[in-house]
Amino acid sequence: MTERLLTAEEVQQFLGVDQAELDWLVQSKKIPCFKIGGTYLRYPKDQVAAYKAVQKKKIQRVSWQGRTLDFWRYNGFYLISTGLLILVLYFALQ
């Protein structure tokens, strides 16, 4: 049985990556490739699909506690500063 080989453009479209990221995946040996004719790279479709499936499984849903913690971590200073400014203005204008 012959396995289907993909071109670099087809792999980029299939994975949704650009050329630089595809080069990095090949250099880090996350996706195997074959040289045909010395310069033309081809990628085995089944192994590219397996890589994509593994990457999908790595994406995890973040709990509401995690989202709340991130919200306060990145916006806490602004919220506290705004609250203090409102308090100062409230007491200053009375």
Image (cartoon, rainbow, N blue to C red):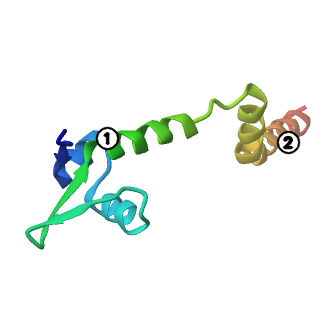
Residue 45 vertical placement versus 60 (above, below)? below
The quarter of the image holding the C terminus is top right
- Taking 63 as reference, is 14 left or right? left
Q: Which residue, as the protein is rendered here, is positioned at the far top? A: 64
- Taking 39 as reference, is 91 left or right? right
Q: Residues within 10 Å of mark 2 (few under 14, many from 20)?
A: few
Give the residue at x 71% y 33%. Answer: 67
Q: Which mark is residue 84?
A: 2
Q: Position of residue 88 (x, y in %)?
A: 87, 41
Give the residue at x 41% y 63%. Answer: 29
Label 1, label 2: how far apart the Cα atoms are: 58 Å
Residue tagged 1:
46
Q: Position of residue 37 (x, y in %)?
A: 8, 69
Which of pointers 1 and 2 lies earlier in the amino acid sequence? 1
Give the residue at x 79% y 30%. Answer: 65
Q: Position of residue 89 (x, y in %)?
A: 83, 38
Residue 12 vertical placement versus 64 (above, below)? below
Q: Amino acid at mark 2?
A: Leu
